[in-house]
Image: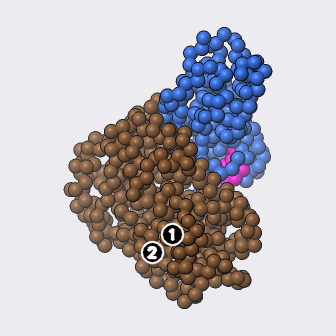
Chain colours: A blue, B brown
Amino acid sequence: MLEPFRIHDCALIVRMGGVPDAMNLRELRDRVVTCPPECLYHHFCETLLRATFDDPEFRNDFAVWASRALHDRALAEQLGVIDPYTFDDREALRAEVLDIIADRLHELPMVPWAKRGEEFNFMRAVTVVFDTGHDITEPSDLPGAIERMTRSSLYYHFVEARRRTDGGTDDFSTWLSAGDGEAKALIQALQSVDFYFLTLGELKTKLIQVTRRALNKGGQR
Amino acid sequence: MSISLAAYTDVVGAPAIEQLHQLADDLAGMRVVHVNSTKSGGGVAEILSWLIPLMNELGLDASWEVIEGNAPFFDVTKSMHNGFQGNPVDLSDEAKAAYIETNVSNAERLRPILEGADFVFIHDPQPASQIELTPHRRGKWIWRCHIDASHPSRSVWKFVSQFARQYDASIFSMPQFAKSLPHPQFIIAPSIDPLSEKNRELAPGEIKSVRDRFGLDPKRPILTQISRFDRFKDPLGVVRAFRTLQIDPRPQLVLAGGGATDDPEGQMVLDEVRKAADGDPDIHILFLPGDAHTTINALQRASDIILQKSTREGFGLTVTEGLWKAKPVLGGDTGGIRLQVFNYHTGFLVNTPEGAAHRIRYLLQHRERMRAMGRKGREFVRENFLLTRHLREYLTLMLGLKQELRDHLAA
């Protein structure tokens, strides 16, 4: 018998990262060496919760800056493909970013600069987590519950959970794993979602789809 | 008149409202005081007029105090404002003395209120020195800078920063505006109230009546810039752009704005704009009272294109208002306008009067594109720049400060 899953939500407030702005690629490299890991996390992962107009071409801020401010498309592509969730920890992620920047600096005849006003601003965020007072009692309720969840709640349980949990997995899978094995298809469905390149709206739609499909197949509807 | 939070459910959805109540639970009963320098006119006063009642509805004990100043004080603070936005301003000793004197006289009245508060938000430079005039403060003090402070005059920043650095935290509208200060600096974009008189839906009759009142012809395009008569809003550049347009039917230009009690330069700029318009019957220069919100709402809704051709801008709430009314916006390529106007999506960023004229002609020839931009702009504002998001960030900031800003907190 599964304990009910308590739905939490979160709110972010963005703050300056306490690192000087980078005006060129060499400065970016130097700042990435020393910036707090929370800055890396923010620029790779918390971008999902920020005000953006459209579906951005690149998911992390370093790639966006390389493209828009340095006009270096090759560098943007190399940085843009980094999936931060494939690294064991943030130091490994930092090393990968530094490797790519160092290679690019080696290739280029001169250091690319950003225009004044387009410097890279290092940021981080404070996340406040709060209890919504709502529970999910049965695995079969999951798609409906996801449908009613705010985007930030979905972010907290499905994306941010990977930073919080030892197994680096989402909270729904962790909850379902504590059951008697009947929810195996549901866990597989959740873990099959390649979420990093989805917006939160797209992620919601995708999760509803895959969990409904898994429940239908497993006859748990 | 204050509006209940529940009334926003239709606009932003029930979960967004529920979220605010959940966040505010842990702040119930906290005493929050906001201080600025004007009760009406300008974006700050507008924000505070909805923020205070909504914080109270959520169970906080919030109030709004206004510092009172004389003409010399507001001359100084206007210079400071201009200096923040990059004008070469050298504050004289007399100017600094006038600033200090007004703050000292206000401190006598404000001190008991501010000393007992859990959170004090001081808005912009005008009341910034209140912090050192309140030695026995017990709460967290936050300096909220609404101005584009990316390249301030050295003299002005040197003077203001001696106060700013004493705060527990500061808030800027964009990362580019943040300064080097010895405390956490937060980024909160401003917002609009979709149910206020300035933004609520209007009946066609209300729009028609305002159009008729100002003699605007509904058969010809209407281009509108709503803003204070301030050099950084570049009303003269807008007149120049309009004069460049040689198209048929000839559009009509509306330049409408009110004064703010803390802006002594307004009349001077208004006179210059009138001179530049040179009696052109298609240029409507309207100096509106500070409470003409419905009129402004109707003018924006009656327009085909909204202009905000600023050369410096903190955020540009008139841009947000225009987008919310589903209008394409031509905005100066500066400050917070860049966060809102995206070429070919919600409008165009322009750098010169010629650029503005060029984009106006383009848009008037692409009516379906204008409508598509309008639809996109409205949804963009709904997601990002309505007061519910703004209020959520204030609550999150207070919770964060209350718990000493660990990166991950439980409310």
Q: Chain of mark 1?
A: B
Give SS at disc 2.
strand
Which segment is the magenta one? A62-70
Which secondary structure class fits the magenta region best? helix
Q: Nearer the viewer, residue B102 or B87?
A: B102
Q: Mark 2 and mark 1 in contact (Cβ < 8 Å)?
A: yes
Could you tell which of marks 1 and 2 lies nearer the N-terminus?
2
Residue at image mark 1: B296
Q: Point out residue B317 in the picture as x, y percentages from the top left corner.
A: 52, 61
Name the image quarter holding the C terminus of chain A: top right
Q: Residue furthest bottom?
A: B279
Q: Where B396 sits versus B232, above or below?
A: above
Q: Residue at x 67, y 53 (%)?
A: A69
Where on the picture, by quarter, is residue A140? top right
Q: Is residue B129 left or right of residue B330?
A: left
Q: Where B333 sits versus B30, above or below?
A: below
Amino acid type for the residue under numbered disc 2: Leu
Q: Where A12 sits versus B69, above or below?
A: above
Q: Point out residue A171 in the picture as x, y percentages from the top left corner.
A: 61, 24
Q: Chain of mark 2?
A: B
Residue at image mark 2: B288
